[in-house]
């Protein structure tokens, strides 16, 4: 799925006429695939980082007008699941938690305020528990 999405992005950036264009659903599907892999032994932090890169590409594509609309709750929850289910050491799990909390999630304004004000608290709790 990731390779196919990359190929679609390359075709669009080169101006090639194609019947397929990446959509929010395309990006979400790839992030969801990474979420399923991150909890496995061969997944881990590299998988979380790739999922975050894909999510950031989705946000950039929407901001630039290449994709219309907004990322939906499915895209957001796929990224959060990828971070939450990650297999790895305590330090890697902490980094995944920070990735989840610091992501540019598109959600309600009240959640943004809560997220920004509690990032340090969550990291400090993670330090104590991990």
Image: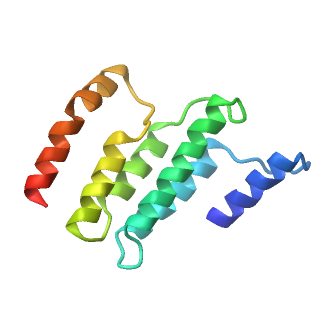
Q: Quadrant of residue 47?
A: bottom left
- The answer, for residue 1, to whether it is visible in the render is no
Residue drawn where x is 70% and y is 58% of the image: 6
Q: Nearer the viewer, residue 58 or 120?
A: 120
Residue drawn where x is 56% and y is 51% of the image: 54
Figure label count = 0
Q: Residue 108: give x, y in percent of width and height.
A: 38, 24
Q: Residue placed farthest to the left in the image?
A: 128
Q: Residue 28: give x, y in percent of width and height.
A: 54, 50
Q: Where's the N terminus, which quadrant?
A: bottom right
Residue drawn where x is 41% and y is 78% of the image: 42
Decide: is 22 above or below 33. Answer: above
Decide: is 110 above or below 28. Answer: above
Q: Quadrant of residue 85?
A: bottom left
Q: Position of 124 compared to 101: left or right?
A: left
Residue drawn where x is 31% and y is 42% of the image: 101
């Amino acid at each position: 799925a990731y390779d196919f999405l990359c190929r679609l992005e390359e075709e669009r950036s080169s101006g090639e006429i194609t019947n397929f264009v990446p959509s929010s659903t395309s990006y979400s599907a790839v992030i969801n695939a990474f979420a399923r892999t991150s909890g496995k032994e061969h997944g881990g932090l590299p998988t979380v980082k790739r999922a975050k890169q894909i999510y950031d590409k989705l946000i950039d594509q929407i901001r630039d007008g290449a994709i219309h609309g907004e990322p939906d709750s499915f895209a957001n929850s796929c990224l959060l699941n990828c971070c939450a289910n990650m297999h790895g050491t305590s330090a890697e799990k902490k980094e995944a938690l920070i990735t989840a909390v610091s992501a540019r999630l598109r959600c309600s304004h009240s959640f943004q305020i809560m997220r920004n004000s509690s990032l340090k608290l969550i990291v400090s709790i993670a330090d104590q528990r991990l």
